[in-house]
Image (cartoon, rainbow, N blue to C red):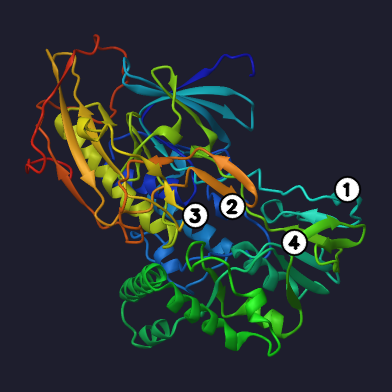
Amino acid sequence: MGDGSRSEAGHVDVLIVGAGVSGIGAAHHLREHFGDHSVVVLDAQERHGGTWWTQRFPGVRSDSDLYTYAYRFKPWHGPSIASGDKILRYLDEVVAEDGLGPHLRPRHRVTAAHWSSADRCWTVDVTRDDTGEDLRFTTGFLWMCAGYYRHGDPYRPEWPGTERFAGRIVHPMSWPEDLDLTGRRVVVIGSGSTAATLIPAIAEQAAHVTMLQRSPSYYIAKPTVTELGTTLEALDIPRAWTSEILRRQFVSQTQWLARTALEDPQLVHDYLLENVRPLLPEDFDVEQHLTPRYRPWQQRVCIVPDGDLFAALREKKASIVTDTVETFTEHGIRLRSGEELPADVVVSATGFNLAVFGDVALSVDGEPVDVADRVTWRGLMLSGVPNMAYVFGYLRHSWTLRVDLVADVVCRLLAHLRERGATTVTPTLRAQDADMALLPWSDPANFNPATSRAPCTCSTARATARRGTTCSSTTRNSTSSPTSIWRTARCGTREARGSPGARAGRRSGSPAIGALGRYRAESECQNGGGSGSSGGGRPGASPAVPARETLAVPVGEAVPGGLR
């Protein structure tokens, strides 16, 4: 419309933003545990699938094993590393089996969400990209599952001389359907997972592919079919058993790698280099091209399935150059060393532009929410922001492992609200923590987010009640689970400031993150009477919310009905 008017789209109990792996997983858990709740899933893309719908460059695949990337409720059967189309097909199966289709709203771009304490609901502004219509939803609970980067706006560095380059410059996130690389000289700028995925896929077609990197990355060659998987297949045991055993094996392997990288980085450094050395050409300079400047796991370790990248190097179909771009020329790229790389096509595998909550503008009672100044509760809610959860997966383990864990907590929280007859839940710092020193969200020596502490306040307000009640529960993460992107994050050379939980309520000396979300909750709660749901019924028809009273309960006191 564009004239400021919005059509009322109705009220739902839970509104999910994002229909990728996080949003589909969240919808599954909600439908499983709250079949009577109305749920809608909004996404700006043409269809569901998230990354696996928007990423279409040659060879696109998972960078995690599928046994842990798959949902807990739908075990994976097949190779441990799978192509993007197979993962999208897997998500399609979840949508079909769970009957989620009617709940999905593609091409619905969420632009803003406003919380009203008076109405005890969120008002969500949406624009339909297919019709241009502006809509307004209201919801009792907002669940942000929009990932962490802008799908339609990849990071493209500004290199000098690109205007005189006679060839074509493309980005993997916006791969042209008409691009034919047959017989072309291709330079791929970047050495991360995208480059490691793309180069083997185009090496057979191109005349030659050069990976141009500013500095090396760590790689690990893994078989797509493991020895254990082959053994289990031969035993003819139930497929569910095989999937669970392999899932636990991959969790254990990744956990060892992550923990040992912190405790004995030299051991992991040597292990990773020795893993790939036998796969390289005999004259390959490992020190120059495959020895990173950083400690293992300060950045992701890139998986090379069946060593395909190194096979391309051995066969002379691809090569690695470690240098920096001085300028583009008419026929290629001139490097700082003076060497010129000839190129017909340059692929900028240079990463993403980060996005916080899908770039949705949040406000609470008219005040904009700057997430950089908030503290996270359990890595899934923000201090001072009522009735909103978010999903941010693991950074070292598979993303989806944490999707299931976050959904577990959110569903328990919604059940707790319903049991209390409560309508709102707000993470709030305790008085004794108000002056707690806040450290940066991530330690520069370790990219994972840090330990967080914040209590969670549940409020009850019923039209017939004389007064409401409040429940405070304090949660500590004993080994901490990765929660969100860092406050000042670099994507290529561009800084993206502001992110969920960007300033974490973390004390000095907090343990580094790397565990699989093992935590315990210490709840202090006074149960409230009455009935109700976490969002059932449209607010606004009841009288003004009565005054609330905070009930102080000693820390550590066990109370039935608390969050566990």
Instruction: Indicate whether 391 appears above or below 334.
Output: above
Residue 390 visible in the displayed image? no
Q: Amino acid under label 3?
A: Asp
Q: For residue 92, which numbered disc appears in the image?
A: 3
Residue 263 vs residue 314, the one in the foreground: 263
Q: Secondary structure at mark 1?
A: helix
Mark 1 lies on residue: 163
Is the C-beta separation of discs 2 and 1 under 8 Å? no
Mark 2 lies on residue: 53
Mark 4 lies on residue: 324
The mark that comes first in sequence, 2 or 1, is 2
The mark that comes first in sequence, 3 or 1, is 3
Q: Is residue 245 left or right of residue 225?
A: left
Q: Secondary structure at mark 3?
A: helix
Q: Amino acid under label 4?
A: Thr
Q: What percent of the width, then of the height, locates residue 315?
A: 73, 85
How far apart marks 2 and 4 lie (CA) works out to 32 Å
Q: What percent of the width, then of the height, locates residue 562?
A: 14, 41
How far apart marks 4 and 1 lie (CA) works out to 18 Å
The mark that comes first in sequence, 4 or 1, is 1
Q: What percent of the width, then of the height, locates residue 145?
A: 45, 43
